[in-house]
Structures are given as C-alpha cells and as structure tokens.
Amino acid sequence: KTEYTKKNIKEELDEEGFIIDFPDDKNIIIYGGDDSGTLFGVYEFCERFLGVRWLFPGELGEHTPKHNKLVIPSEKIKEEPYFKSRRLSGRGFSTTTIWEKETGPNHIWTNRLRGIGRVEFHHNLLNLFPPEKYKDTKPEIFPIINGERYFPIKDEKDPTWYLHGWQPCFSNPETVNEAIKNISEYFSKYPSRKTYSLGVNDSGGFCECENCLKYVEGKKTKSGAPNYSELYYSWCNKIVEKFPDKYFGLLAYSNVIEPPEKIKLLPNIVPFITQERLKWADEEFKEYDKNFTKRWEKVASCLGWYDYIYGKPRTHYIIPRLWPHLMAEYYRFGYENNVRHLYAEAYPSDDWREGPKLYITLKLQWNPYLDVDQMLNEWCEIAVGKKAGKYLKEYFTFWENYWTKRIPKTEWFQKNLYGMYLDFGSADYLLG
C-alpha cells in the first residue's frame, strides 16, 4: 500500500481480496486487502494470464507453460473469497498465509490454492481449563459423571488424548469467570490475534450434576444423545459478551450439535456444524441437512461447516473418493444460507491417488460457482496431456458415480446416514 496504489485504488477490500488494475499503459497494480490478499492477487495473475497451475504439492504438480509473448487485457479485476475460512487438515496443509520459502510443499500448495483459516474452533476446553491447574484449586470446574467428580487421568502412552472425554460443568458460574480470566490473559499475551476457540472437548463427558441436568430435561439429539445445547450456548454467550471485538468459533458437535431453542448466539460466535456432506447423495438426507442448516441460520449470525472428505489409504479409504459436482452443489447452498467458514478433514494419500479432488475443493471454497467440468477437464489434460486427459477424466468420473450413485444404496451407507461421518473403519464401502 504505497502512495501510488492508494491514489489509484479506492475500494474497500476483504483482507484476502485483491484488485488487479491497469491504471495506464505502463503499469499494473496488484493490490490486496492485506498481505494475504496481495499474495493471492499474485497467484491469480500467474494463473489467469500466465497459465500456471498447481495440480498437487511439489515440483511434479507444477505446470508453467512457455510463452513467446503475453497479451493481457487491461480490464480491472476484483475478487474476494466467498468463504472467509477455507481450511483442510492433514499432511501439513496451510492454516495461515505464508511466503513461499518459509515452509514445506504441502503448506505452499494449499496457500497457492488460497486455503486459509480465519476462525479458531477446534476442541479447546482442555486448554482453557488445564486439569493440572484446576484439579486441586477448583475441582468443582470438572464434571460429575456417573455420580462422581471426574478428573482426567494422565496416560503416558497417550499424552494428549487423556485430556478429552470430559467437559467443564457449564452450569457452574465459576467456569464462566475462569474462562473470561484465562481468555483475557490470552489476548493480553497475543493482542494481534482476533479469534479464540470455545470448541468442546472430544468424546462427550458432559456434566450430570443436578443443575446441568435441569437444562437437559430429557431432550435428545437426532442420534439419541442427551442434548446440552441450551446450557452450553448460554454459557458461551456469557463469556463472549466480554470480548465484542474478537471471534469465537466452536463445534456444533456431539451433545451440542442441535441449535438452541430459547436463545440466539452473539454475532461474534461462529458455530461449525459437523457433518459428512457426501451424504447429500441421499435425497432424504440432503433435505434433512438443508433444513438443519436453516435451523442454525435462525440462531447464529454466521455459520461454519465442518466436513469429512477423507482419502487417506489404510486408515480411511483405499480407493479414490471424490464427488466434485455434489460438492459444488452443497457449497453453493451453504453460501446462500449464511455459511461463511469451511473446514474439512482431508488427509490425502502420499501418492495423491484422488487426483483433482482437493484442487477442486479449494477452488470451490474460494468461488463455489466455478465450472466443475471445466476444472476437471483442465486438470486431467495438464496432468497427462490432451490425448490421455479424456481417459483420466473418465476414470475419476467412474469413481464419482461410484460414491454418489452406487454407494448410497448400500447398507454400509444407510446405517450411518444420520451419524456425523460414514464408517471408514469398515471395508464394506467396497461392496458398492
């Protein structure tokens, strides 16, 4: 942002948005909302005008065509992301914007496809209330489970997982006071940070004390678990109101997956609704999930979606698993219904056997209205050449049909239809 660019660029921009402009016949401006936007503007220039593509991480995935001359239309371009967070997990993918020499190929590749996270939301109450700090000083913070006060027991064989399987007592005012104190200390230590996670710990362990159970009153989630949403989201509001200029992500997950009925979330809370949306291949589930998102839209100013798009062999799936057209459909619906943050557990294989899946995923997360077939054709042709590209596309189309038309009819798919994710622990998905 120099005097020259400020003189020529007047628009307001999202921090990751950019403008490519041609103020006269001698100058090109690439101008970002902040450094992230500038970097993404450079990547857009390379893709749009130079034909550069990054099919997958590493040098082998880079395509840089040679040009005898460049002809660039001098028409102003302005782009901003449709979704504010576009984040994948697994194999060192990007979570923050980086410059190219600072990290490894997976991180760089995600960055080039503009993958980034802007709201923290993961399991975090174990960090907000560390057991070693509170076990002796404020034991009442911990839940009553099966009639007894529960304290996490450290397991040297699994040094972090022992911290899951429990939640603080959300009906105890002391947990609100301690949370506000600890979050204040966090932002004092890191004043430039804009976000903090209030995500529940993994694997349940909600308090069963008399006060907590008053809020539950026999309410159940669709999966049949006790519904703690009214209590938990009221607890979140009490904390978040003290930090109006910060954003708090959290997980609509497990016992708190349902939207609360009696309250609305404060506008700086972003609930990430956890669901494997490949299940939109089933029409009944698609309508259920659409309605579920709309129910959440009534109580939250802004939504996040948490998805499971696993491809990792052995521990998840051993065959390619991709559904780009269905993915475009649900991203478009999400955008049109106030979903602004996306996250997916991806975990690709080392050999990138799923081809264009994550490439198209990140492209659609930037702009869900892009042409899926055009991206598929281009990716396949660049990967193996124009002549062979149509056969490679046929191969991936076979797998897309397998997962969106054949698999939904199987018992393996239907028995997990209303769970959070499909059963990758069973190999019965091969029976499609």
Image (cartoon, helix red, strand yellow):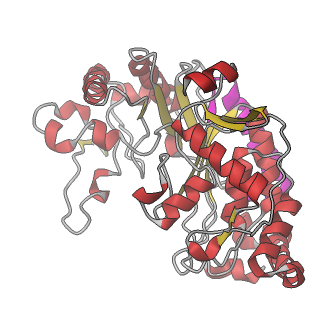
Residue 146 pos. (x, y %)? 31, 46
> Residue shown at 63%/47% (left/top)?
42
Q: In this rendering, would 90 be left or right of 169?
A: right
Write down the region rendered in magenta. 278-303
Residue 187 pos. (x, y %)? 31, 26
Rendered image quadrant of residue 332: top right
Residue 406, visible in the rendered structure: no
Rendered image quadrant of residue 313: bottom right
Q: Nearer the viewer, residue 88 or 154?
A: 88
Residue 39, visible in the rendered structure: yes
Q: In this rendering, would 84 be left or right of 123?
A: right
Q: Is residue 348 magenta?
A: no
Q: Return the residue found at the far front.
A: 26
Q: Nearer the viewer, residue 39 or 195?
A: 39
Q: Nearer the viewer, residue 317 or 14?
A: 14
Quadrant where the C terminus lies? bottom right
